[in-house]
Amino acid sequence: MASIRRTLSPSPHHHFPHRLQLSSSSKFKYQNQNQFLSSPSSPLSPFLLFYRRPFYRFLLCFLLGFMFGVFPFAHLHFDLDTNLGTVPFSHPSLRPRQRVDRHSLSSGIHTQRNSVWSSSKIKQAIVDGEKSIKDGKLVIVVTPTYNRAAQRYYLNRLAHTLQLVEPPLLWIVVEMGEAVTSETALILRKSGVMYRHLFCSKNNSINFKDRGVHQRNTALEHIETHRLDGIIYFADDDNVYSLELFNRIRQIRKFGTWPVAMLEQGKNKAILEGPVCDGDRVIGWHTNEKSKRLRRFHVDMSGFAFNSTLLWDPKRRYHVAWNAIRQLDTVPEGFQETTFIEQLVEDESEMEAVPPGCNRILNWHLHLESKNLPYPKGWELSENLDVNG
């Protein structure tokens, strides 16, 4: 007689065979798991169990990426690759300017490779540039100016000279009057030079020879009040200066002087006024004017420079009892320079020759402008001049 075995029909409850025996702990875990899966209060449980492993992997990768970002294990270096013609990032002021030729754009890669610096040269240039800026002394150029026919020409010429001087440099321009003029302010803004625009409120009716004295004293008071540490140089706007002069001035420790070439009025010859030097020492003076032979120091106003700390540090200057170092308007014309220098140094032993030997002329004092030239206020004429020929 044939026997037929029926398969078990599916049922929602799984029954173990009677012969399979489970421990009490296994029964407890199995019952809790079935209860958790079949509990109607947790409808998202199968979803969480399905994405549990990918979630753990994502969390592990996120933590590893966070650790690599906070604690980098490598440093990036932008080294120079001469084969590829790439230049590392450097200070823009130290990067050489290169002129682009539009007619040779096809050979631009070859030209760029030939003009690229080596890595050591670029690093050395950066170090030298930072050292020069750090060790360079501030040059404080004091320029008195007033309204006259050639004022715009002189200020623009001096501004173009100061543009070529290596920083740091401060240009202090002092005008005579109750306020600064907009015309002079416009020139200073366009000059590209760091400047300070001041005015001297003294009466405009004072003598012409004393006008510059009061203007320079205004600048000295400003420097002393704000403790501007640098080398002070009185540079009139109608003089001619070489760039080497400002580089030499930056090296002065206390007081430096040099000869100035002067064009005599009404004569076709130039004379020298300033020190006679033996190396770095001042041993005598050039002078050709009998009326000025009684002066202690034969120096032009643009023929010396000094450290600004002498203004507020009495221990460094000669006359300790003086409260303020200023130029004197009570002395005769031509003696303002020597009476001012006598407040700073005692004798020639405290002076520095600029340059050593005083064998070069670094600036010129030219008398080319007529003081009686009429010119109205401001910079422009409202009407044309009536010229009778």
Image (cartoon, rainbow, N blue to C red):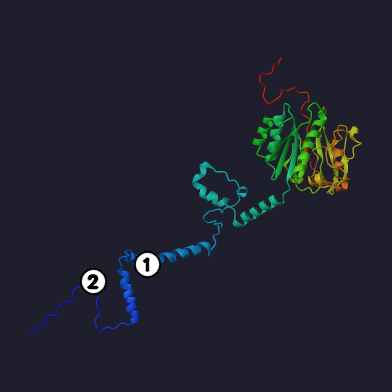
Mark earlier in primary sequence (2, 1)? 2
Query: Where, quadrant-wise, is the N terminus in this rendering?
Result: bottom left
Label 1 sits on residue: 52
Secondary structure under tag 1 reads helix
In which quarter of the view is residue 55 placed? bottom left
Q: Tell me residue 20's x, y (percent).
A: 27, 83
Under mark 1, the amino acid is Arg
In the image, residue 310 sits, relative to residue 202, either above or below, namely: below
Secondary structure under tag 2 reads loop
Marks 2 and 1 sit apart, C-alpha to C-alpha, by 26 Å
Label 2 sits on residue: 12
Query: Along the line of sight, which residue is nearer the eye, 108 or 196?
Result: 196
Query: Where, quadrant-wise, is the C terminus in this rendering?
Result: top right
Q: Nearer the viewer, mark 2 or mark 1?
A: 2
Q: Tell me residue 6's x, y (percent).
A: 15, 78
Determine crowd level at label 2: few under 14, some 14-19, many 20+ residues with C-alpha closer than 10 A: few
Determine crowd level at label 1: few under 14, some 14-19, many 20+ residues with C-alpha closer than 10 A: few
Under mark 2, the amino acid is Pro
Residue at (78, 43) in percent of width and height: 224
Q: Judge left or right: residue 72 versus residue 93.
A: left
